[in-house]
Every structure is written in C-alpha cells, then in structure tokens.
Amino acid sequence: MQQAILNKEPKNMLRHYSALYKGELLNNILPFWMNHSKDELNGGYFTCLDQAGKVYDTDKFLWLQGREVWCFSFMYNHIEPNKEWLNMALHGADFMKKYGRDELGNWYFSLTAEGKPLVQPYNIFSDCFATMAFASLDKAMPTDEYKQIALDTFNNIIKRRNNTKGLYNKSYPGTRSLKNFSLPMILCNLSLELEHILGKEKVDEFIPSIIHEVMDVFYHPDLGLVLENVNEDGSFCDSFEGRLLNPGHAIEAMWFIMDLGKRINDEKLIQKAKDIMLHTLEYGWDKEYEGIFYFLDLKGCPPQQLEWDQKLWWVHVEALVALAKGYALTGDENCLRWFEKVHEYTWNKFKDEEYGEWFGYLNRRGEVLLPLKGGKWKGCFHIPRALYQVYKTFEAI
C-alpha cells in the first residue's frame, strides 16, 4: 500500500480525491436527503430511513433536526447559494422553532412527527446542534431571531456544562463524579461556528480553555491516548467508564484542534494533534479485519458496550477528515498513507452502490449489519460534512 502511494504523483492523487469527494457529496448524499427526509405535512425531517430511503419510523430527534438544518445552510454558505438547499434548511428550522424547546429554552431530545414532546431535554447535544443550526442559518439569511436563538442556546450550554443532564442525571452525586469528553470536543468546533455572533474577541477568550480541557485534561501523554471519562481533577478512574476509549471521538477532536491551531497559528499544537490522531488510529485499527473499532477498554478488559467491535460510518469518515487536514497542515506522509488505507476500507464497505447514500453499521468483519440509511443516531451530518472537508482540504493544496 505504501509503495502504491509513493508511485503516484501526490498532486494528481489529491486532485483525484478532491473531485471524487465533491462529486459524491453533490450527486449522491445531498440529493438522497433532499428526496427522502423532508416531511411535507408537518415540517422538519424524517431521519429513520431504510436502505432505499423509505421512512420506517416518524419520530423526530432534535439533534438530528439541527444537524440537517446546519448541513444544508452550511452547503448554501460554502459551496453555492442554491435556493433549494436554503429552503430545505428553513423547512427544518421552522419546525424546530415551533416545537423544539421547553419553557426554559432547553431543546427536547425527541418529538412526534407532529411536534409533540416525546423525550425530555436531557441531552445537551440537542442544544449543541440547535446552536450550530441557527448560527449557520443566520449566515445564510441573517435575522435577529436566528442570532438570538443561537446565542441563547449557547449560553444555556455554558450554564449546563458541569452538569449537562441536570435533573435527568441518573448518577448518584459525590461517589464517582466523572467528566465526559464529548462536550469539550464539540465546543472546539462550536465556538468557531458562532464567531460571527459572539465576535472574534469572545471566541479568542474561549479557545484556550477548550484546548486546555481537551489536550491537558482528557489527553494523557503517558498513554498517548484521549480518555472518554476522567475524574473531576483529570486523573484516571479505573472503572468501566474510566477505561473507555472511543477512537472516533478522539480522532474527530484532533481535527477540531488542528483547525484551532491553524487559527491561532500554533504549529506545535497542530503537530501534537496530528501525532495524537495518528497514534489513536493505529491503536484503534482492527489488525485482523481492518477498520476502526467503535470502543475499546484501555486495559484490554471486556468492554461494557456490546457493540464495541462494530465498524461505524462516522468514525471512519471523521478519520478521513483528520488525515486530510493532518497532511495539509504538516506534510506528514504518514497521514497520506493512512488516508488511502482508510479511504479504501470506507468507500468499499460503507457506500451503497445500489440505492445511494452510505450504510452506517458494519459488523467486525466489515459486513453490513443494518442496511438503514438513517435512524435515531445517523442522519444528514457526518458524511456530507466529511466529504466537504476532504474535498476542500485537498483542493486547497
């Protein structure tokens, strides 16, 4: 595999990948969601789509509604001002505005097709992606209302960041108080999404604390790995939660950190993030069947998650983004070698040649486990964002 890359002219290879990823985004992924997810009767989007795009469940999950609003408004802002994309984003945003929040401004986790609350607002990621959605939509069609929704929701996230589930938290207080990596990871990206609303100075103030949380609290240099849960003081907790590794989260976070490093012109931070990303990828790669494990236990104990050995779509496409950015920002050819390896696995295993879009869930051997194209966790987000990031990153080189 290394020899195959070395025999290629790098610029031609990057040009090929850039065109391939752009074509897949514009000709396959976005049309699939445009054609199948729009709820013309009630507003918002259906995300529970089977292999062919047929709706198999009508519940609406607010974090996926927000992700799809973000996706189509982002593409409108960054590729071309396509009115169909903007209208698709507005369609979802109108539904979210009307039904998505409780009286305190917290975003529910799920609603019925008509917009009646199903699950309480326990999950702060509904709020995170609502913030991203309305911030992005405000760039496409600036209004005081969109700005205020994004700002109010962001401020609510900051208030809740130390106890994200609030009264819905099942943990008994004081016995094993752990910090989780997910929110600091997302805040890396969210802060940049909000810059036109918060202002450059506010974001510049915010960035160091986020970088510290990711790189000094959850990253443990003695392991060379990012932990998913740590004690309040950042120390290791020898428990199911404390031993948990989520290679996809760590890899995704490292491209967020690389973006922040580029913004603040910190070459050492970029190099460090690239090195952590490569080490995590090597650690999480299945040496027997290929692909990246979903979860691992730091000590090799049986993971609590029964799905630990599955191969998931988002893990692999986020790795492709991180590798593309790692190469673009550092010139490290290991990133390019790994990119081709992960690319071959991802495009051969996840892409559905028959019905379009990509599968989300494979078993350890790389066989399709569930043929769905969307559900409670998979929507219109990781794949289109990754295709965009890769094509733009390589195009710039």
Image (spheres, grey):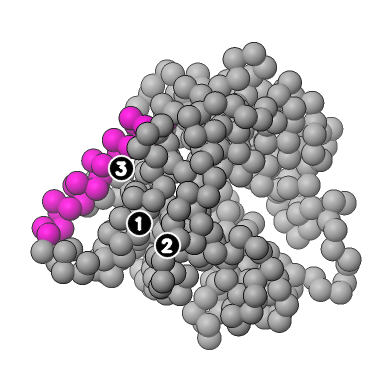
Please provide percent x and percent y for residue 264.
42, 60
Which residue shows up at 79% across the image and 53% down it?
165
Residue beneath disc 2: 291
Badge 1 vs badge 3, beta-carbon distance below 8 Å:
no
Please tell me which of labels 1 and 3 falls first in the chain: 3
Number of residues whose C-alpha sits closer than 10 Å to that of mark 1, classed few (under 14), some (14–19) or many (20 or more): some
304 in magenta: no
Mark 2: secondary structure: loop
Please provide percent x and percent y for residue 175.
86, 74
Which residue shows up at 35% across the image and 27% down it?
80
Q: Which three-letter amino acid code belongs to the residue tagged 1?
A: Tyr
The label number, if any, that marks residue 21 in the structure image: 3
Badge 2 vs badge 1, beta-carbon distance below 8 Å:
yes
Camera-nearest residue between 222 and 329: 222
Residue beneath disc 1: 345
Please tell me which of labels 2 and 3 falls first in the chain: 3
Please tell me which of labels 2 and 1 falls first in the chain: 2
Query: Which secondary structure type mostly characterizes the magenta part of the structure?
Result: helix
Please provide percent x and percent y for residue 136.
52, 34
Q: Which three-letter amino acid code belongs to the residue tagged 3?
A: Tyr
Q: Nearer the viewer, mark 2 or mark 3?
A: 2
* Span shown in magenta: 8-30
Please provide percent x and percent y for residue 345.
35, 56
- In which quarter of the view is residue 305 placed? bottom right
- Cα separation, mark 2 vs mark 1, equals 7 Å
- Cα separation, mark 2 vs mark 3, equals 20 Å
